[in-house]
Image (tube, rainbow, N blue to C red):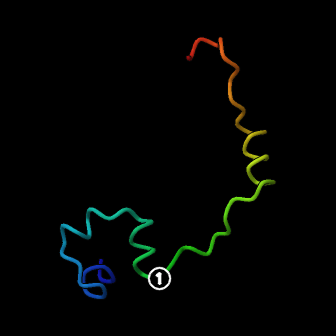
Amino acid sequence: MRAGMQGLGLAPDVFWRLTPAELRLMLGQGGETAPLTRAGFDALLAAWPDHPKGDGDE
């Protein structure tokens, strides 16, 4: 709270509407994560495959 309200000068209502990711970005944190690579995307597809059509969740 101190970093957001005193350090950044945010009004309380603005501070409380921020997501944790937005606050981290405003504090100069975050953004260090590399973009998703094709290998990472393929790993996600393997872990969470799409269901073929006809499974009743169309």
56 and 24: which is toward the camera: 56
7 and 26: which is toward the camera: 26
Q: Residue at x 70, y 36 (%)?
A: 48
Classify mark 1: helix, strand or loop.
loop
The quadrant holding residue 26 is: bottom left
In x, y percent, where is residue 54? Answer: 65, 11
Q: Seen in the image, is 5 located left or right of residue 34?
A: left
Extreme residue toward the bottom, this view? 7
Q: Quadrant of the N terminus?
A: bottom left
Vertical comparison of 6 with 34: above or below: below
Q: Residue at x 78, y 39 (%)?
A: 46
Q: Residue at x 25, y 87 (%)?
A: 6
Q: Residue at x 24, y 84 (%)?
A: 9
Q: Seen in the image, is 44 located left or right of residue 21?
A: right
In x, y percent, where is residue 43? Answer: 78, 47
The quadrant holding residue 52 is: top right
Q: Seen in the image, is 57 located left or right of residue 38?
A: left
Q: Quadrant of the C terminus?
A: top right
In x, y percent, where is residue 34? Answer: 68, 69
Residue type at the position of mark 1: Gly
User: Label 1 neighbourhood size at 10 Å, few (<14), some (14-19), many (20+)?
Assistant: few
29 and 58: which is toward the camera: 58
Vertical comparison of 48 with 1: above or below: above
